[in-house]
Each structure stands twice: as C-alpha cells, then as structure tokens.
Image (cartoon, helix red, strand yellow):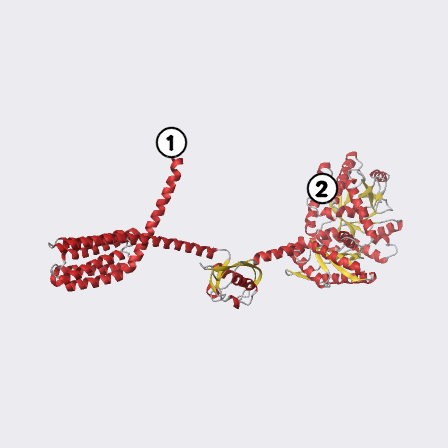
Amino acid sequence: MRLLERLKMRFGPLLSQERAKLEEHDMLHRFLREQVLVTVCAKIPLTMLVTMLVATVLFYFIAPLVSFYVMLVWYLAVFALSMVRIFFALRGCRYGSERSLEARYRHFRIEAVAMAVLWALAAFFFYPQGHMPEELLFALIILAMAGGGAITLAIDRKIAAVYTILLLLALGLRMLACDEPVYTVLFFLTILYMLVFLVSIVQLAEILEKGIRQNQELGELRQRLDLIADQAPVGIFYFDTEYNVIDCNEALSQQIGVDKEMILKINLQQLKDQRPLATAGRVLEEGRVVQYEGPYVAMTTGREMWVSAIFSPLRNLSGEIVGGIGVLQDKTAEHEALERAEFLAYHDSLTGLPNRKLLEDRFRLQIAQASREGYYSSLLFLDLDRFKHINDTYGHNVGDELLVETARRLERCLRQSDTVCRLGGDEFIIFLPMISQDPEKALEYTWRISRKIHHSLSREFDLEGRRLFVTTSIGAVLINGQGEEIDEILRKADIAMYHAKRKGQGVTSFYEEEMDRRLSRIIRMEHDLRHAIDRDELFLEYQPIVDLQTERVYGAEALLRWRMPDGTFVSPAEFVPIAEESKLIHQIGHWIIDRVCATLAELERTGRMRFYYISVNISSKQFGHYGFFEEVMRTVERHGIDPRQLKFEITETTLIQESDRAQALIARFNAEGIGFMIDDFGTGYSSLSYLKQFDFETIKIDRSFIRDILIDTDDVALVRAILDIARQFDYSVVAEGVETAEQKELLRGLEPTMFCQGYYFGKPMSLEKLLEKVGAQ
C-alpha cells in the first residue's frame, strides 16, 4: 500500500497531464469530425449532381462499346446512390434515428466508399480498349473523378486516399492487363499519378486541419472577447474618425437606457450633451488616452447621470488612428451616495435640517462678522413639550412625522440667513445672526420670533389621521459677539429652556445669571441628595389626622424631611422636584414606605398603635414605575404589618398621567387592603370623572379652600359641594390646612363626621411626640 501511494504521488501529476492531453486530443478529434461533416454535407448535393452528369456522359459514349445492360445497371446504381446521398446531405447527414456524431460519420464513410467502389468497377470493367478516342475520354473521366474526389474529400484523408486508390488502382490494373507495352507505361504513369495524389491529399488534409484548428482558436478567442465585452460591468463602444458609433456592448445599452440598434446609428457629434465629447475629441487629434468624469444627460431618455469615461485611440497595424474606444461607467449611485454622505455629515437624516456641526460652522462665520460690525444675534433652544408621551402613545412613526412637520414650520418662521438645526430627539436650535446693533431691538425681534414659533406650532398637526396639538418651551440667549463659544451659548440657552419648562408649557424664557446660580444649586443639591439616605440625613415627621367629632387622632400623614450635615433644613418643595427629575424618587419613595412599614410593625408589636393608619404621599413618577405594586407588597410582607394600616395619597395629576393603568393598579392595592386617598382634591382636572372611575377611600380637601373659608362664601360653597359629592360616593373626607378654632367649628357645622388636618391640631412632629399626643387624649 505504501508503495502504491508513493507511486501515485510520484507519477500522479504525470498521469494527470497525459489524461488532460488525451482529453484535449479527443475534443479536437471530435471537433474535426464535426467540421468534416459540416463541410462535406454542404458539398455533397453539387458533387453528386456533377457525378450523375459525368456518369451520364460516360454511359453515352462507352455503353455502345461494352455490355449495354451491365453498364445500365452500373449507371442506375450510381444515379440511385447519388440521390440517396443528396437526400441525407440535405438533412445534415442524419440517418434515421442515428443522432450521434460517430454514427453519422460512419454512414458518410460507407456512402463515400460505396461510390468509390462503383467507379472502380467502371474503371476496371468498362475500359474501351482498342478505341483510342473513347480510351482517352474514359481515362480523363476516371482521372478527373479521382482528382475531384481527392480534393472534395481531402478534409478526411483516409476516405480521400481510399477513393483515389480504388479508382486509379483499378484503372492501372486494367491497363496492365493489356498486352501492348504502351499500356504498361500507362500503368506506371497511373500509379505515379496516384502516389502524387496521395501525397497531395496528405498535404491538403494537413492544411485544412491546421486551418480548422486556427479557425477554432480564432472563434474561441472572438467568443471570449465578445463574452468579456458583453459581460463587462462597464459600457464599451467603438467609433470611427467621423465619430460614428461602430459597435458597443450590452452594458452600455443598459446604462444609458437605449437599444443597441439605436446606439449604432448615433454620431457622437450630434449628442446634445457635448461635455464628454470635448474630452473624446483629443483622442483622435492628439492620439492619447484621456478621461472625463462628471455629469451627463442621455440624449434620448434625458436621464441625468454621473459618468466616468476613458477614451483611447484605436490604431490599425500600421499605427494609424482609425477611430477610438470609449469605456463608460455609470457612477450615479456612487456619486449620489457620496453626496448623501456629505449631506448627512452636516444635516439631520430625519428632517434634513442642519446638524450641530453645520450650526457650529455657520455660528463661527456669522458671529465673527457680527462682532466686526457691532451686531447683536440670538440663539433659541426649543424643546417640544410632552413629546415622549406622544411617542409612547402613538408610536415612533407619528413622532417622526411630528418632528418633520415641526422642522418645516420652523423654517417658514425664519429669514433665509437664519439657521434652524435639529440637535437631537425633540430639541431644535434656531440661530438668528446679525439682528440689530441696538440690543433692545434685537431683544424685541427675538421675542417676536419666539411668539411666531409658538403660534405656528400651536396649530393643529394632522399626522396619519390623528389630530394633535403640541406646545414648545423655548430658552433664548442674546449674543453680543464678544467671543463666547457656541458651547457656552448652548449651555445658557439650555438653562433658559429648562427654566421655561418649570414655568409651564408653551413659554419662552431668556437667560439670566440668576438661572445659572439656581442651576448650580440644583446640581449640588442633587449630588447631596444622592448620599442623603446613606448619611441618615432624611427622616420622617408625622402630622396627625383628627376625627372632628371626637377630636381624637384617627391617623397620621408621614412627611419627608431633609436635614443637611450643617443643620440646615431643605424644604420638600425644593428637593422633591429634584428627586423626581433625577429618578432618585424611586429610591427615596421606597425608603419612606419601608420606614413607615417598620414603624407600624414596631407600634403593633409594642401595643402603642392607638390610631388606624399612616398615609404616605406617592409621586406620579413612583406610582408609574413598573414593579411598584410588587415592591410595596414585598415590603409589607417583610415587616408583617396589616396592609389596612397603610394608605397612599396621590394627586389627580398622577391619575391623568397614568390613567390607563392606574385603575387596575389601585384595584390591586385595594384587594390587598391598602386604600387610596385623593390629595389636594379640587385643584386638578375632571375630578368627578375620576371619582366615578376609581375606587378611593378618602377625599382630602385642598388647603386653598380652607384658608379663606371664614371670609369667602365661594370657598364655603365649594367645600359644601365636595362634601355632597363624598356622601354620594360614600367617601370619607379630610380637610387640610385647618389652623384656627373658627375654621374647625365652621367645618363641624358643615359635616361633623369629617376629619381634619392642620396646625390647629398639630404641626408635623416626630413619632415620639405623636405618640405622646395620642397618649394624652
């Protein structure tokens, strides 16, 4: 086995080469045979007609000198075989069901040999000895048949040789059979003539075979060149010295969208767009390769293209320029992609507005000019109000359409020299350069533009059949051109926009230094608030909720307090909004619920739970946080408290923001025993509809209705109406902000079973003081 493997490794390549040579030889052999059939089949009809004519002449002159009937049989045989050969030649030398090349070639050889045998028989048996004119005619006919057959069949040297030998050898032997010496000489001359014919046949066959090979190679080369030209990914065309297009490939036809037949009728000088021809002309004039790259408009279709064309001179064998070659490549897609890439480098892909990079370039140029000429400019920072809510409600497609339409409306509000830029998301920047040299006029113009923007964006948006109304918050900065960088300008505009959002929707706010100081304080406060829990700076105080009928503590509201390390107290009104914006409200809210649950558990364990519940204020961000229910229930279970001792206070604003899931969430908490109280009732929206839709336990009347209840009859009427509503829905009522005995008595007169909360009954206090107050009852 190892020996065989070594032999294979050693001689394998040689065997592969020999096998390849044999396959190549076989392919050539088959090609030659095919060419033989094609060639001779085309010649057979004419050759056979000539053969029948010659046989008729021979029969006419020789039949009287030999056996008439024998020669008649021969004549009919030649005639019949000739007709058969003509019949099959007209069918492409196909014989019945035989379709293979070898079978067709074999039948062709049989026919040729049969015809040679018939003429050899004539040469031997019909020679007219003793009749000199007929002998000479006969010899010439046989020699002519042999020569004609040799030339006709030379493409197949074997058949040609057999044909010649049969005819001339039969003639020679017939002459040798004569007793006279002259016939012996004629025999040798005939044999010599046959040998010359045979040598000529070999030479002619070699010439024909070589020609066939060269024709095959040239055909294959031409075919390869045609395939290369037709399948090339570029357009190729040839033109003469008069600029007439001589030939082209299919790629050119496809690129310019014109049929090839029409292209071949085009003269390049007649093209409407002569830009490429201006370059091509130098090919014929200067005889050098030139290139053109640029736009081109097709003559017939009018299609605008971006082409890359190379023109080269076409020379003959003598080196004379006889025309030119053009290679055309359609670069439209690449050019458009490059333009698109350049556009996207400086523009927003969604709205087509300039991006920050282009804004910065324009800002530097225009601010430099404004500074030289003493002009004021301004920059507006826009943010769409509640855009995230629109995206979440209607989907990103509607959100994208809103941004595109907003961009169009902003552009219509501005001068041509102004720049509107999409910074990202729903934020837009408007740069108003060189407004005025008077700062008051520049300020007034900026206000006017901001009002125009508010008015434009306040109009209804019709997006995918949905009618939406939006507002925008705008922060504005007046620029005096004293070298401030754009990053600093944008920072100030962002601060002003943030301030506008805090003031309400659809507001414009100009930057002031105080905003910067306030923002710095907010940032510091946010940083300190992140560590307030770990540092034990947060704590809870409890404000009692009193039963007005008995004036005993019925419940308490837990209130968050923050005492900083230096002993300074931070108002909840100041740090709670910061906690909500920074997402710290989730962590702080969880800490409050955990502390209240721990307090309830401790009071229950020590037997000091002398009131019914402690309520906790829940932020809208906390209430809307997914997993809030599970988090609360885990805390309740961990501390093992009665869920009925825990109440949650939420505002109507929270219900508006989380309307879809609030009803189901409240129902889940109610099922576990945790009740809900509506805080600040009467200050929100659609209060009655929410009372009907949601299942609450208690309504807390906002302190704004209690503060002036002694002097404002409208407040009395509103409180009375709220009490009537509560009775209808069977809700308990807590009046907040009760600070005087007179207020208490007035409320008692309105509804003695209600509950009250306020400084009159107790300010927010520590748990121990609350327990002392409960114990002293």
Q: Secondary structure at mark 2?
A: helix
Whether residue 341 is visible = yes
Q: Which residue is mark 2?
A: 632
Q: Amino acid under label 2?
A: Val
Q: What distance separates the C-alpha of mark 1 from that of mark 2?
A: 84 Å
Residue 243 is left or right of residue 673, and the answer is left
The tag on residue 3 is: 1
Q: Secondary structure at mark 1?
A: helix
Looking at the picture, how far across and down is residue 231, in whole percent? 47, 55
* Residue 222 versus residue 524 in the image, above or below: below
> Measuring 86% from the left and 54% from the top, which residue is drawn there?
708
Dividing the picture into quarters, in which one does residue 291 lie? Answer: bottom right
Q: Quadrant of the N terminus?
A: top left
Task: Indicate which label's residue lies in the foreground, 1 or 2.
Answer: 1
Residue, far top: 2
Looking at the picture, how far across and down is residue 703, in whole percent? 83, 51
> Measuring 88% from the left and 56% from the top, which residue is drawn there?
711
Q: Quadrant of the C terminus?
A: top right
